Amino acid sequence: MIKVLFICHGDICRSPMAEFYMKDLAERAGLAGEFEILSAATSSEELGNGVYPPVRALLERQGIDCTGKTVRLLRASDYEAFDLLIGMDEYNLRRMQRLFGEDAAGKLHLLLEYAGRPGEAVADPWYTRDFRAAWDDVTAGCRGLLETLTGTKLIDFAGCESREELYAVLRREMAWEDWYGGNLDALWDVLTGLPHEGERFTIALPRADSPAYDYAEKIRAVFREAEQ
């Protein structure tokens, strides 16, 4: 099991956003049992508080429940307890370095490293009030993190409500030629030919109540068969 701790200043906006999105992504990808995911604060000023209401509302709009989450303070023992400790900005990273000392195991990172944006910060929406921008950065970082940890390419069907939308995602992510059809046979041909032959994928299904869920499971079955 891989243990990941997301960290921000107060643990009411960015780090719980990352915690609960990453949990949801792992669940939809069928990998929930392979991860332990939590979040923590570098500051004690929000101790006892829950997720900031605009963040809670944003998560709820995505079908993600953060009920029961309260601020957890980062502690020195977390360095040994977790495999990765991922901050949102340089200030978080400096606070971690001050608490843990030398990062001998290379566990300390910024989230946007995993989105191909090393050194960049997830701006704190407590100050910017731009919760959507924070969400976009957090989700990009978490998707990249999942790909890094699994050594696969992620295909995420979040929000898909129809077969057509599923294939639109596949065409974009797989760079299908226009002449490929929108069916499982065409998918098999793409997966077993160049450039994807031998490549590994992680498929995150849409929510179970989506009309596209059953067909998305068939798509994931084709991916799994092609990888054998």
Image (tube, rainbow, N blue to C red):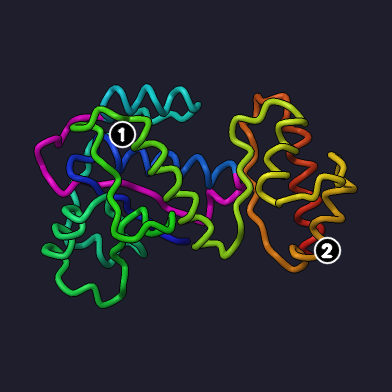
Count every numbered label the image shows and give the total.
2
Mark 1, secondary structure of its residue: loop
Three-letter amino acid code of the residue under disc 1: Lys
Vertical comparison of 151 with 75: above or below: below
At a point 67% along the width and 45% down the height, the residue shown is: 172
**Image point (25%, 27%), residue name:** 129
Residue segment shown in magenta = 29-50
Q: Which residue is drawn at 65% across and 24% down?
A: 209
Q: Is residue 33 magenta?
A: yes
Vertical placement of 19 versus 211: above or below?
below
Pointer 1 local density, CA inside 10 Å: few below 14, some 14–19, many at least 20: some
What amino acid type should be assigned to the residue bearing mark 2?
A: Gly
- The foreground one among 130 and 4 is 130
Name the residue located 44 percent from the left edge and 61 percent from the top edge: 2
Of marks 1 and 2, which one's residue comes earlier in the chain? 1
The quadrant where residue 109 appears: bottom left
The residue that disc 1 covers is 69
In front of the other: label 1 or label 2? 2
Q: Quadrant for the C terminus, please.
A: bottom right
Work out how far the residue at label 1 is from the one at label 2, CA to CA, in angstroms.
46 Å
Q: How crowded is mark 2: few (under 14 residues within 10 Å), some or many (20 or more)?
A: few
Percent from the top left, x then y, of residue 103? 23, 73
Q: Badges 1 and 2: C-beta atoms under 8 Å apart?
A: no
In the current view of this chain or complex, which residue is farthest to the bottom? Answer: 104
Horizontal and vertical percent position of residue 4: 37, 56
Residue hosting label 2: 193
Q: Where, by quadrant of the figure, is residue 135 drawn? A: top left
**Left or right, 71 with reference to 207:** left
Is-magenta flag for residue 1? no
- Residue 205, position in %: x, y? 65, 39
